Amino acid sequence: MPIYEYICEDCNTKYEKFIKNRLAEVVLVCPICGSQRAKKIFSLFGSSSTTSGSSSQSGAGESCGSSA
Ligand SMILES: [Zn+2]
């Protein structure tokens, strides 16, 4: 059961989308502002999104800063 995470590009709201059929067209609608612009988040690898700018992320924060 694939559940993908998306983040709204308008209000930066993170929400999950349940994808039943990959071949079907997925309409992404933000539950907050109703925008259909969203970016896919790969939560498998943790938070490694390179988004420039100040955005409040929901989480505890970085525990250890490991530079690759
Ligand atoms: Zn939104």
Image (cartoon, rainbow, N blue to C red):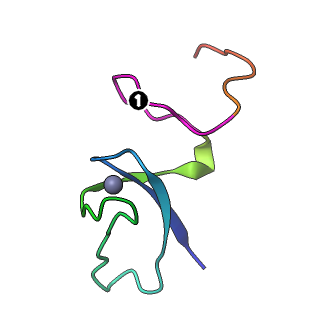
Residue 18 vs residue 36, the one in the foreground? 36
Q: Is residue 3 above or below residue 57?
A: below
Q: Is residue 35 magenta?
A: no
In this view, the residue farthest toward the right is 63
Q: In percent of the image, x 65 and y 37: which residue is there? A: 59
> In which quarter of the view is residue 61 placed?
top right
Residue bearing mark 1 = 50
Q: Is residue 53 above or below residue 37?
A: above
Residue 61 vs residue 35, the one in the foreground? 35
Which quadrant of the rendered structure holds the C terminus? top right
Residue 27 is situated, as x and y percent measured from the top left of the image, at: 29, 75
Q: Is residue 67 above or below residue 1?
A: above
> In which quarter of the view is residue 31 placed?
bottom left
Which quadrant of the rendered structure holds the N terminus? bottom right
Residue type marked 1: Thr
Count neighbours of disc 1 (C-alpha within 10 A) and say few if under 14, some if 14 to 19, many if 20 or more.
few
Q: In percent of the image, x 57 and y 50: which residue is there? A: 43
Secondary element under disc 1, as helix, strand or loop, is loop
**Can you tell me which quadrant of the image ligand 1 is in?**
bottom left
Prevalent SS, magenta region: loop
Q: Is residue 68 above or below residue 6?
A: above
Q: In percent of the image, x 60 and y 44: which residue is there? A: 45
Q: In percent of the image, x 34 and y 46: which residue is there? A: 11
Residue 28 is situated, as x and y percent measured from the top left of the image, at: 32, 69
Residue 57 is situated, as x and y percent measured from the top left of the image, at: 53, 35
Q: Is residue 49 left or right of residue 64?
A: left
Residue 35 is situated, as x and y percent measured from the top left of the image, at: 25, 61
Write down the region rendered in magenta.
47-59
Q: Is residue 49 left or right of residue 60?
A: left
